[in-house]
Image: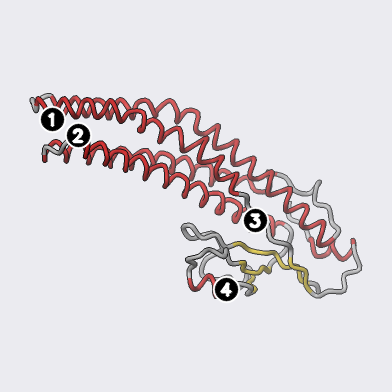
Amino acid sequence: MPFDLPAMARRARNVRRKTITIRDIIPPQMLARDLASTAYAPIVAVWEDATPRIMDAYSLSLTQMTMDSPADVQREIEAAEGEASPLYLLLDARLRDWTLRVERWFRGKWRGAILSATGVDLGTLIGPEGVRASLETHLAWNADLVRDVSAQARQRISAAVFDGLRARTPAREVAAKIREATGLARDRSVRIASDQLTKLTSSLADERRREAGIADWEWKHSGKRHPRVDHKARDGKEYSDAKPPPEMPGQLPYCGCRQLAVLKFD
């Protein structure tokens, strides 16, 4: 339920400052690693575990090159995809658990930051219900991304195998391409998990700020080594809901920027 935090802060303390900037809340990478290991890694592991079987079928097909040989390889690839299907049934529960853990963590940090800055305890005023729509959106988004990681791994493995059969490529070279494909899937999973943590916490920061009746905020640059030039230029600048920038912090792919809520007193 929306509330007027600036008014509550005035009542809690004799505020003499014109503005109060709420401290930065930086999401811990431990949460991103948890997402990668519980939701993404098991799917990637299916393709890694299937590699020896796929390569056995490939080696046999390369030797025989009968009409049925490519079909044998295809069956192994489809079998691996079938092994991933039961994991999708567990996926929603794992993603929901992770999403709710991030919400609890952020809510605790937000409550502490507000209490420290204003003397107002939001413990009885905020809960997961206030950000339910955002949580459901990110839950569905992550589920789609996990499936996309698996689909891309299958596509790369299939391309390596069937291109190899057409070109009579030695098995060791095809095996190297498959290992590269699964390695890319694992690396991408880690990057996606980190980006999804940033996006979820950025969304929570935006919703909690609006819920508290705060319209103004400051752009906090991520400090990454290869930043977007325009994002770095926005560091420390103030924006408002009435005059926002072209995109919000954390919105673009792999953007690690954050917003700091700014309370303003008349």
Q: Which residue is mark 2?
A: 171
Task: Give the alpha-carbon distance from disc 1 to disc 4, as whole Å.
Answer: 57 Å
Task: Give the alpha-carbon distance from disc 4 to disc 3, as whole Å.
Answer: 18 Å
Left of 196 or right of it: where is 214?
A: right
Task: Give the alpha-carbon distance from disc 1 to disc 2, as whole Å.
Answer: 8 Å
Q: What's the residue type where badge 4 is placed?
A: Arg
Q: What's the residue type where badge 2 is placed?
A: Ala
Q: Which mark is residue 26?
A: 3
Q: Is residue 11 above or below residue 74?
A: below
Q: Are marks 4 and 3 in contact (CB under 8 Å)?
A: no
Nearer mark to the viewer, of 3 and 1? 1
Residue depicted at x 30% and y 37%: 154
Q: Which residue is mark 1?
A: 62
Q: Which residue is mark 4?
A: 234
Q: Is residue 259 above or below residue 140?
A: below
Q: What's the residue type where badge 1 is placed?
A: Leu
Q: Which image quadrant: the C terminus?
A: bottom right
Q: What's the residue type where badge 3 is placed?
A: Ile
Q: Residue 15 in the image: state x and y as whole percent.
A: 87, 70
**SS at mark 2 in the image:** helix
Task: Give the alpha-carbon distance from disc 2 to disc 3, as whole Å.
Answer: 47 Å
229 or 210: which is nearer to us? 229
Q: Residue 143 in the image: state x and y as whole percent.
A: 47, 40
Left of 247 or right of it: where is 152?
A: left
Q: Are marks 1 and 2 in contact (CB under 8 Å)?
A: yes
**SS at mark 4 in the image:** loop
**SS at mark 3 in the image:** loop
Quadrant position of residue 70:
top left
